[in-house]
Image (spheres, grey):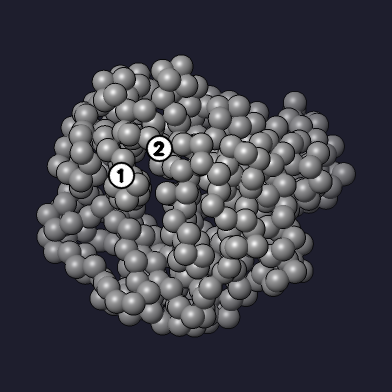
Amino acid sequence: MFKKVLIANRGEIALRVIRACKELGIETVSVHSTADANSLHVRFADHSICIGPPQATASYLHLPAVMSAIELSGADAVHPGYGFLAENAEFARDCARLGVTFIGPSPEQIEQMGDKATAKATVKAAGIPLVPGSDGLLSSVEEAALVAEQIGYPVLLKATAGGGGKGMRIANDAEALASAFTVAQSEALACFGNGDLYMEKMVVQPRHIEVQVMGDQFGNVVHFGERECSLQRRHQKVLEEAPSPLVDEEMRTSIGQAAVDAAKAIGYSSAGTVEFLADPDRNFYFIEMNTRIQVEHPITEMITGVDLVKTMIRSAAGEPLPFKQEDIELKGHAIECRINAEDPATFAPSPGNITGYHEPGGYGVRVDSWVHDRAKILPFYDSLLAKLVTWGENREEAIRRMRWALDEYVIEGVKTTVPFHQGVLKDEEFLSGTFDTGFIARYLERQ
């Protein structure tokens, strides 16, 4: 097992990793910007190192500064968390050059699944269903038009290096395709330095279903069931639940096996998530694989009883998975609300100082947060304040428990999305479980 782990992140995920390391008897090192000097992840780690000014590009995303901190700390392993450098293959490669274990997949696995076109080719060879689309990158608008004619409109243009909805445009007909191609290409080039695009047919009334997987260094891979992630605004998840109201046992078996097959196709040996689109008839199609721990991993932990972060660390240390697929049982239902420092009406960021703070509690309630009374909510980083998670024997109980927890949650000094979630949990479409990725837009129109 590792002796000292540096956590190359901030906020709630840094605290989550610190707690897992403490349970494993591992010394921890946090890194921080000057703005985060008094943050909880700095206070709770055994050691801390400042890596730069407040801007993420000059600190948490500044690879030379992070690598210097790793070398200075004497850590024998690094956990990247999610976001920032978590899916940066060069970061994983630099750690290996330094003789430090990257708690995650290999650089080659990150690259293979990080490039959307390569990932699609890999899973296609493994027999995993894909949304009909271009065989590779689109060289021109003319080629895009030919592909669109073959697969039928509407189509979705996507940046091969994309994420978070950037470099993505819908074209409903040939007339709209040319401008959509130009805009998507320009946005992808500006955001990722890579303007390469590919095309997929639009799935009507799609659900966003993802499957949590875990691999070890002995070729073992298991899945932990699915998560329902269809509640998104501008391609950003706002509420997740597990299991999905759509998925029955037959689909769970097949989509779980597809996720395992995708991971095994690249010899995957860490925590990862395989994402799919599903239609109302329970047909599913591979979208991408995220080669890191996900924001929403707590809901899977709540229904399986497995500590995914500790398992991820143990796997990186060379330990085999302590369970087989038949050992993984899904019990009950869990829901996660992402509580952001945003105006619930406009979703505009709401930085400021926390003047009052009280977390909800009780059986089946979990809060993963970095916030405390008098904490400063800074404009430099993601607006996530907390992940509020509830568990119940069934979906109805988990929803009731979440309503109470939201009512009990006190965050004063900044605007938050608590009222937004309170409204969603009373909405008939959400309660029915028949929603799709267009739910949030429809919900906001109803208000």
Badge number at residue 25: 1
> In the image, is 88 to the left or to the right of 61?
right
Residue in the image at 32% along x and 63% along y: 367
Quadrant (top left, top right, bottom left, bottom right) of the N terminus? top left
Badge number at residue 35: none
Q: Position of residue 12 (x, y in %)?
A: 31, 50
Residue in the image at 46% along x and 16% along y: 97
Q: Position of residue 424 (x, y in %)?
A: 44, 73
SS at circle 1: loop
Q: Position of residue 353 (x, y in %)?
A: 15, 53
The amino acid pointed to by label 1 is Gly
The answer to whether 63 is drawn above or below residue 117 in the figure is above
In this rendered view, identify the residue nearer to me: 433 or 119.
119
The answer to whether 297 is drawn above or below residue 149 in the figure is below
Q: Which quadrant of the view contains residue 203? A: bottom right
Q: Position of residue 189 (x, y in %)?
A: 55, 27
- Residue 418 visible from this viewpoint: yes
The local crowd at label 2, few if under 14, some if 14 to 19, many if 20 or more residues have their Cα within 10 Å, is some
Q: CA distance from mark 1 to mark 2?
A: 9 Å
Check contact, mark 1 vs mark 2: CB within 8 A: yes
The answer to whether 419 is drawn above or below residue 287 in the figure is below
Residue in the image at 44% along x and 29% along y: 101
In this rendered view, identify the residue nearer to me: 440 or 48.
48
Residue marked by disc 2? 1
The amino acid pointed to by label 2 is Met
> In the image, is 104 to the left or to the right of 54?
right
Quadrant (top left, top right, bottom left, bottom right) of the C terminus? bottom left
